[in-house]
Amino acid sequence: MCGGGGGDKGRAATDAAMRAEDERKAAAAAAAAEAARVRDADTASAAAAAERDAYNNNLNFATTAAKSRLINSLKDRNVFADPYMDRINQAVADQQALIPTNDKNIGSYFGKDFVDNVLNGITASERGKVTKQVNSKYSPTFADNMFSNDANDSYINKILEGQRTEATQSIDRARARGNLDDMGYSRALGRIGELSSAGFNTANNLADARIQGYRGSVNDIINNAKSAAGAYNLGDSFNIDDYDTQIANKQAEFGKNLEGDTNAALAGQTFFDIGDILNKGGIAQGAVNPSVTGTPNTGATGANGVNVNLLQRGAGQGSVF
């Protein structure tokens, strides 16, 4: 019995030792597996870090190169890049945001199309600025306001007044000769007044053609400014002062030549037909002329013994005055 008990104890000890060994081996295997996992994780992390570094390096290189291309493209157009750097940096940042993480072909996002699009955007912005400047400076009525319709009225009135004075002097002489009585003279004066109004309208229409010519010249200058602004490209020279100078020169020319232009436009125009005026006066006063002495005629020979003409009033008779 004692021997059997000792055998059981030996087997138990052996089993315990074996279990301990198994546990040790299992622990060692687990430790080895954990060490391998850690090594793999470290390797993966290092690889990921290397990949991130490579991506960031490529991204930095691509964005720097893109900015350089844009700056050089502006220089090629003789345009200083500094005023546009904020716009360039923003365009590069916006494009960068479109790139998927770890994309291996970063450079393709900053190629020729990208550069052209940024330059086109800058050009459109600058073109809009100069176009706005022109439209703000030159309103649709700019030329009309510069050369008003009444700019030449004083010169027109000077010409009309000269002809009116001559017409008035003619009926004054006719009255002095006894060819017009008070009624006829009054009607002749009224006719002069009628012709004054009509004459001014006619003269104004003729002379205003010269004003329209100056307006047209200024509008041509303005249209040239608008065309240049609308076609503006980076590197182009656009200075609105150049167009202001042209307009100022045209305005000075207008002021200098206005009287001469008005006189030329009205040259040869007769606004007071003396025959018509005297004829209207003759019709108003009756069938015969007053006598030379102012006494109405009763026949071909007056009571004073002086022959006077008996005139039938009507069209075509004014010249006898």
Image (tube, rainbow, N blue to C red):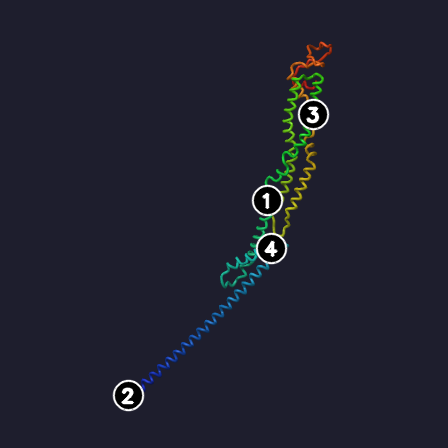
Pinpoint residue 74: horizontal percent, then vertical percent. 61, 55
Q: Nearer the viewer, mark 4 or mark 3?
A: 3
- Left or right for 100, reference 211: left
Pointer 1 or 3: first along the chain: 1
**Which amino acid type corresponds to the residue marked 4 in the rendered image?**
Pro
Residue, disc 1: 136
Q: Earlier in the sequence, mark 4 or mark 3?
A: 4
Q: Residues within 10 Å of mark 2 (few under 14, many from 20)?
A: few
**Of marks 4 and 1, which one's residue comes earlier in the chain?**
4
Q: Callout 3: few (<14), some (14-19), or many (20+) C-alpha neighbours within 10 Å?
A: few
Kindly report which numbered mark, 2 or 1, lies closer to the viewer in this rendering.
1
Q: CA distance from mark 2 to mark 3?
A: 166 Å
The residue that label 2 is drawn on is: 5
Q: Earlier in the sequence, mark 2 or mark 3?
A: 2
Residue 124, position as x, y percentages in the image? 57, 50
Residue marked by disc 3: 165
Mark in the foreground, 2 or 3: 3
Residue type at the position of mark 3: Thr
- Given residues 42 and 148, the one toward you in this image is 148
Whether 38 is drawn above or below 199: the answer is below
Residue type, label 2: Gly
Numbered disc 4: secondary structure: helix
Q: Which SS class for mark 2? A: helix
Q: Nearer the viewer, residue 3 or 116?
A: 3
Quarter occupied by residue 268: top right
From the top left corner, tell me how far across and down residue 32 is, in percent.
Answer: 43, 77
| Residue 138 pos. (x, y %) | 61, 42
Residue 124 vs residue 34: left or right? right
Q: Is residue 230 visible in this depiction of the protein?
A: no
Q: Residues within 10 Å of mark 4 (few under 14, many from 20)?
A: few
SS category of the residue bearing label 1: helix
